[in-house]
Amino acid sequence: MINNVVIVGGGTAGWMTASYLSATFGPQISVTLVESKNVPTIGVGEATFSTIRHFFAYLGLEERDWMPECSATYKLAIRFENWREPGHHFYHPFERARVIDGFPITDWWLRQRGTGHFDDDCFVIPALCEKKSSPRFLDGRIFEQREGDDGSGLAGRSTMTEQRTQFPYAYHFDAALLARYLTRYGTARGVRHVLDDVTDVVLDQRGWISHVTTAEHGELHGDLFIDCTGFRGMLINKALEEPFQSYQETLPNDSAVALRVPLDMASYGLRPCTTATAQDAGWIWTIPLFGRIGTGYVYARDYTSPDEAERTLREFVGPAAEGMEANHIRMRIGRTRNAWVRNCVSIGLSAGFVEPLESTGIFFIQNGIEQLVKHFPDKNWNDQLRTSYNSHMARMMDGVREFLVMHYYAARRENNQYWKDAKTRPLPDGLAERIENWKVRLPDSQSIFPYYHGFESYSYHAMLLGLGGLPLQAPAALSAIDGTAAEKAFELIGQEARDLTDQLPSQYEYFAHLRKLP
Ligand code: FAD
């Protein structure tokens, strides 16, 4: 085994990696994390993906341990507003489509309903979001939990690629508070924490990293170096000169402006979802945390200026934004060609980023860490491990890129040049053909991007039905199959949604209760 790992960077990527490696290897491997006092973290990654539960469970953390300390809340869905036309909304829930007589209920919906709200008809989660319900009862049970089942379909420690059932929620959290929490977790388990600037990355004769030089702590030597320096890619892109491949041609949003807005959640309430509201040059996220909202406008500089974007965001938030300082961020959209080069693995923004839509930044980090452990090198540094890791990471990001490009392409909104251009911009290889296929048959596991990228066919259904810009058809066979079972399923979903919203506490109530527990 290699036994000395040096992580450069102490943002979400750095601390998630350090804590995961310490939970995995304990004292067998020494982990040092060096982070700058002077270079701030990006600090805005606040919404996650439902697979995040594997990360906390792997660390042995219960929700009541870490959620109150990180102002965390539940996320059951993304609510898309105005992507079709002003005033329209729909939900992309963490909920698989039920299958009735061999066809997903979304196919039946196209056949038997076809107008109104597909999300309310096919899924129960949208009703929970509307009612601002908690997915857990006050005694801790999850709304759809069966006895003896923790919701993952798995026993013991697990990772995202083994997930068999769809876990019904993810989390929102304050990224800075989570990094602080994980700092305590990691250092208590032996991670050496160095607060200093890395001033140089020194290569040996083979071009491998031999050590990094710091301003005040001398040289830090290691076998394996993890680049968590964010968009800088100080080790992977700068020192090792691995090229960055931009996705800008297909995903034009390259900037964001963010605000943290304190709110009285007792009266405002906590809707258990992220909201993505379409705007003239991008979209605005709204993430309810316990005590404040995180909000930001993701936009393309080719279509609006930072000043205009900030004005739009402030108008959107209203008086609560007064006096709040805006954080302007330039985004590097794309991926480093190979995430792992020689003895350096990049994780986080240094490895790649596709823009915040669908909240996949932390999902990339988690998958990067899980795969690193699965591909962990020994002193032979087998090339095959690197190749396998790199193709896994590249496919994941390329797959998510495709899913996001589809959001803009398939949105009915076409009110200005930004949204018109989204329909004529070049599509990533293979997507045009897939879209033609989806127009005659909703996607299934065989007709979406063919490698693991975190999204299943039901997510594509939710987006295509919600965005409303593409013509969709029910399978012809359904006109000759008795639809009684499907009608019953629609009724059952409606009834379940009504029962649950009657019985579940509000999300605010749930967290107020959790915070009072001893
Ligand atoms: P950073 O946070 O940039 O951390 C870099 C670290 O490197 C810092 O600690 C810095 O001090 C250190 N460093 C840099 N140079 C040196 C040096 N020379 N010496 C020592 N240390 C150094 N993801 C989601 O999953 N959900 C979201 O909702 C979401 N929203 C986002 C919104 C925006 C606008 C953006 C830009 C990103 C968003 N992301 C989101 C992505 C998410 O923020 C990142 O994936 C996550 O924060 C990880 O960042 P990082 O740790 O890679 O980099």
Image (tube, helix red, strand yellow):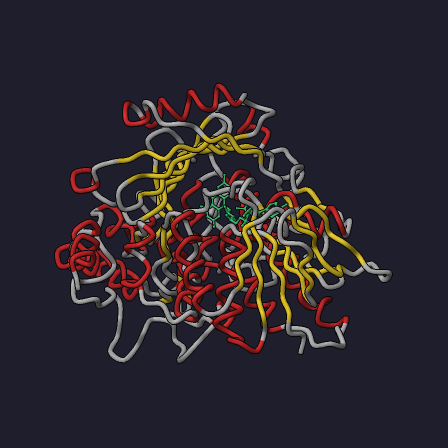
Q: Nearer the viewer, residue 110 or 259?
A: 259
Kindly give the residue lying farthest to the right in the view shown.
205
Kindly give the residue lying farthest to the left in the view shown.
502
Q: How many marks?
A: 0
Tell me the quadrant of the picture where the N terminus can be found: bottom right
Q: Quadrant of residue 338?
A: bottom right
Tell me the quadrant of the picture where the C terminus can be found: bottom left
- Residue lying at 36% horizontally and 43% vertically, measured from the top left: 79
Q: Quadrant of residue 89?
A: top left
Q: Quadrant of residue 497?
A: bottom left
Q: Say whether residue 84 is visible.
A: no
Q: Say whether residue 51 is visible.
A: yes
Residue 171, image x and y in percent?
36, 54
- Residue lying at 46% horizontally and 63% vertically, measured from the top left: 187
Q: Considering only vertical position in the picture, is 165 above or below 244?
A: below
Q: Nearer the viewer, residue 423 or 201?
A: 201
Is 453 situated left or right of 135 in this image?
A: right
Residue 341, image x and y in percent?
74, 60
Is 260 situated left or right of 383 in this image?
A: left
Is 142 situated left or right of 36 in this image?
A: left
Q: Considering only vertical position in the picture, is 425 above or below 70?
A: above
Q: Considering only vertical position in the picture, is 83 above or below 395?
A: above
Residue 168, image x and y in percent?
34, 61
Q: Nearer the viewer, residue 87 or 469?
A: 87
Residue 433, image x and y in percent?
64, 50
